[in-house]
Image (cartoon, grey):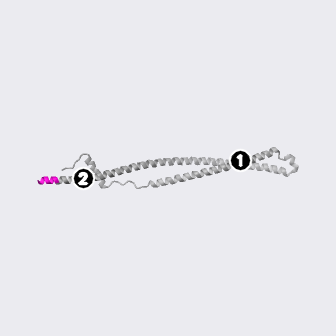
């Protein structure tokens, strides 16, 4: 009778231990599920961050290409400005010639501007005016494109800085001793080891 009572007490103690271990195993399973969910979430965030990084690199490359194009247009604009300066000098020379001829009546029939010379002078003035108008439009377009590019670059830098700040979040905490023990016991019980009676 005493042996049966002792065996019954041991069986009850083992059942109590088993219930505790099952409770711990349940907690560990829940924690493992949370960790797996967190890993899945982090993997998704990592993929998203990699996509954003690739996109940001592509935007930086595009901005560099646009900056090169703007520099080429700026050089072309400077070339037009030089051409306009040469046209102004030529126009002033033509005006100077026609003015000096008009100021000397004795040379009027020799150096007087011919109708062809007047036409050339007007043609040069019209060409100069058209090129100056074209240059003004080119300058405005370049300024607008440069401002838009600077705004895009600032937005890109702000986004990269915000992503860098987000990357400094706290890492996952390692499992506690009790969670590790519960995982160990669960692993042993799942392999078919039963406690001795």
The region drawn magenta spans 1-8
Give the residue displayed 28% in from the left and 53% down from the top: 24
Q: Which mark is residue 130?
A: 1
Q: Is residue 3 magenta?
A: yes
Q: Which mark is residue 122?
A: none
Q: Residues within 10 Å of mark 1 (few under 14, many from 20)?
A: few
| Closer to the camera in the image, 7 or 150 | 7
Report helix, strand or loop for mark 2: helix
Residue furthest to the top: 116
Report helix, strand or loop for mark 1: helix
Q: Is residue 137 magenta?
A: no
Q: Residues within 10 Å of mark 2 (few under 14, many from 20)?
A: few
Going from N to C along the chain, the mark reached first, 1 or 2, is 2
| Closer to the camera in the image, 130 or 82 | 130
Q: Answer yes or no: do the residues labelled 1 and 2 have beta carbons within 8 Å? A: no
Q: Nearer the viewer, mark 1 or mark 2?
A: 2
Give the residue displayed 52% in from the left and 46% down from the top: 58
The residue identified by callout 2 is 19
Answer with left or right where residue 30 lies relative to residue 103.
left
């Amino acid at each position: 009778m005493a042996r049966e009572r002792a065996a019954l007490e041991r069986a009850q103690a083992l059942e109590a231990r088993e219930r505790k271990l099952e409770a711990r195993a349940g907690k560990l399973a829940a924690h493992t599920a949370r960790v797996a969910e967190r890993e899945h979430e982090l993997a998704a965030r990592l993929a998203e961050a990699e996509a954003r990084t690739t996109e940001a690199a592509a935007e930086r490359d595009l901005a560099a290409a646009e900056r090169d194009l703007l520099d080429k247009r700026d050089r072309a604009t400077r070339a037009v400005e030089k051409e306009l300066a040469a046209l102004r000098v030529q126009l002033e020379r033509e005006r100077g010639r026609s003015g000096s001829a008009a100021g000397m009546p004795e040379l009027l029939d020799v150096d007087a501007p011919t109708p062809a010379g007047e036409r050339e002078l007007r043609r040069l003035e019209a060409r100069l005016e058209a090129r100056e108008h074209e240059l003004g439009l080119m300058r405005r377009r370049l300024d607008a494109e440069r401002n838009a590019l600077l705004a895009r670059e600032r937005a890109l830098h702000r986004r990269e800085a915000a992503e860098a700040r987000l990357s400094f979040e706290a890492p996952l905490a390692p499992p506690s001793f009790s969670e590790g023990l519960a995982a160990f016991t669960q692993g042993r019980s799942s392999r078919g080891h039963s406690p001795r009676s």
